[in-house]
Amino acid sequence: MNRLTISLSESRYRALKQAAAQRDKTIGQLIDESLDFYGIKSNEAALDLVRRARARSTLSPEQALTLAQQEQHATRHAL
């Protein structure tokens, strides 16, 4: 497992430490869960997610592409 050093304000560090203790987790576990919540995944995990979605999809590749383009267009215009 890799190590990471980050700089936090003292108040932010205390809040993070308290939140981890309240949940009976380590700070590392809490950060890891937060990354999952925000959808931050390794390439391997992201590719596995795409593989599973494709296996369960009933759309043809053309239909999937059209849907993806429509959703992207709608999202960009909603901003």
Image (cartoon, rainbow, N blue to C red):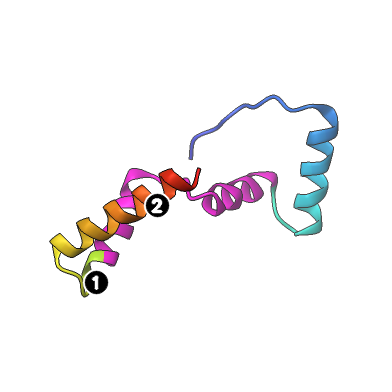
* Vertical arrangement, residue 37 with respect to residue 3, above or below: below
* Vertical arrangement, residue 35 with respect to residue 24, above or below: above
The answer to whether residue 69 is visible is: yes
In the rendered structure, find residue 74 and report the number of the disc placed on it. 2
Report the amino acid beneath label 1: Ser
Q: Tell me which label, 2 or 1, sits earlier in the chain.
A: 1
Q: Is residue 40 magenta?
A: yes
Q: How crowded is the residue under tag 1: few (<14 C-alpha within 10 Å), some, or many (20+)? A: few
**Image point 31% across, 48% down: which residue?**
44
Q: Tell me how far mark 2 sits from mark 1, CA to CA.
A: 21 Å
The answer to whether residue 48 is visible is: no
The residue lying toward the viewer, choosing from 26 and 65, is: 65
What are the residue bounds of the magenta stretch? 27-53
User: Taken as a whole, is the magenta stretch helix, strand or loop?
Assistant: helix
Across and down, in percent, residue 12 comes to 80, 35
Q: Left or right: where does residue 41 sit relative to residue 60?
A: right
Report the amino acid beneath label 2: Ala
**Element assignment for label 2:** helix
Reading the image, the residue beneath label 1 is 57
**Element assignment for label 1:** loop
Across and down, in percent, residue 6 comes to 64, 27
User: Label 1 near label 2: C-beta < 8 Å?
Assistant: no
**Image point 42% across, 43% down: which residue?**
76
The residue lying toward the viewer, choosing from 68 and 7, is: 68
**Image point 75% across, 51% down: which residue?**
20
Q: Left or right: where does residue 59 sit relative to residue 18?
A: left
**Image point 28% across, 66% down: which residue?**
52
